[in-house]
Amino acid sequence: MKLTDEERSNLDGTGGEPLRIATQVLVKLGDSYDAERLVPIASAHLVACSYQIAGEAGIDVYARLVEAGARVRVPTTLDPGSIDFVRWEAFKTPAHYAQRQLKIAELLQAMGVIPTWTCTPYYALNVPRFGQHVGWSESSAVAFVNSVIGARTNRLAAYVDLCAALVGKVPYFGLHLAENRRGQVLIDVAAQVGEHMQGEDFAALGYFIGGLVGDRIPVIRGVCDASVDQLKFLSAGAASTGSVALYHVVGITPEARTLDEAFQGGTWEDVLPFGRRELQDTQDRMSTFRAGKVDVVGLGCPHASIAQIEEYLRLLAGRRIHPHTELWVCMNDVVESVARQMGYIERLEAAGARIMTGTCLNDCPLDAWQFRHLVTDSAKFAYYTPTTVGSACHFTGTAQCIEASIRGYVGEGHDE
Ligand code: F3S
């Protein structure tokens, strides 16, 4: 790789040990992908900030970096941690576990990060513009920032993201190059599906695509409209079942104003039809139980927006959730603060819901709850929570999730 004088002096250790190690990691990564140079980034987003991911080894690494004077060089936000920093006791998190997460928070903040603790940093505090290079991890956020905003990042691994933040650069390869952002697979959405898609349909579309395209770049044709929240659902689904880091939706995302632009004048390697049958088959596959008592309904994956919270309240319509069912709504601190000022948090809590910030059902220890049956509208929760929470999962629409939280059951024959 061609290195600048400053990068060479970083490697010599002139800027201190953290900068030397971080630069070395990035240069080795770049060399292995034949990158010609490092490129400056506008921001970083870190994933190994949760105790669940970082563990004791991460605490050891962070403590050594802080002792050696490490500081991030670009605005750097954090993915969810493993506790609700305010309500961890109410969520039955063991005290020793919470203390370890708090230790990680203390160490990362000593390095100058912005403590957002969210997978939706793009709602506030870390909003890149089109075409900017960034160094992000968190699969759903990477897919969103590449596809919906048109900023450029590879899907960074834990700790490589921190190296990017410490150096303020990433190796210039992969999705940082315009020619590598060309679509490869055409997803042909049938007109009956594409004209009236709900949030759960976008989640299922993402789940379908990720499972079939792997790390290739899909171009979706036939979707008539999509809100930012619906694209967030699509991003999370595609990045869970596959390694999709960038997709295009013709007429909607910024690098796909036309089909031709999405494929950069070329053509596709494969065509995958997505009609009513594929939609139904995918939604069926996303559930591991069809009917029964519901222990917990998980909403806000990725973290909920104000518009989604308004939708939850509209669907609740003043009703209370069932006494044997939990309704957990995950969001970030910024959204919670605004929703509180709007009276929304009080109304959700009055209905019996719990607000979870700083983490999510997938990232915090839930053994004490013994959840067996989870209902969600999120493709990512549907994909991961059977393993992380250890529960069976029923995937459905947001409206049906709210109904399940009120009835305490899904399926027929249990109305009380
Ligand atoms: Fe975010 Fe947790 Fe879902 S990190 S994307 S709410 S699994």
Image (cartoon, helix red, strand yellow):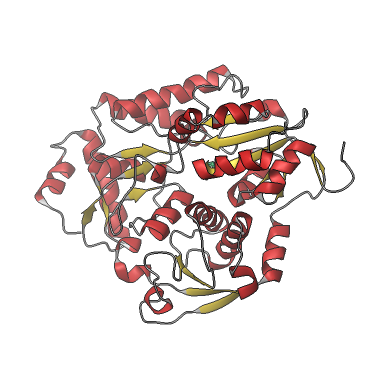
Between residues 350 and 113, which one lies in front from this camera angle? Answer: 350
Judge whether residue 415 can be spotted in this image: yes
Task: Name the residue furthest right.
Answer: 413
| Residue 283 relative to residue 338: left or right | right
Residue 52 screen position, x and y as percent: 52, 34
**Up/down of 307 relative to 34, above or below:** above
**Up/down of 111 relative to 253, above or below:** above
Residue 280 screen position, x and y as percent: 71, 64
| Residue 247 relative to residue 37: left or right | right
Judge whether residue 365 can be spotted in this image: no
Residue 124 screen position, x and y as percent: 38, 41
Residue 345 screen position, x and y as percent: 56, 29
Q: Quadrant of residue 149?
A: bottom left
- Residue at left 62%, top 60%? 201
Q: Quadrant of the C terminus?
A: top right
- Residue at left 33%, top 57%? 152
Q: How many marks?
A: 0
Between residues 396 and 341, which one lies in front from this camera angle? Answer: 341
Task: Name the residue furthest left.
Answer: 5
| Residue 165 relative to residue 52: left or right | left
**Up/down of 238 relative to 376, above or below:** below
Between residues 355 and 85, which one lies in front from this camera angle? Answer: 355
Between residues 336 and 263, which one lies in front from this camera angle? Answer: 336
| Residue 280 relative to residue 195: left or right | right
Q: Quadrant of the N terminus?
A: bottom left
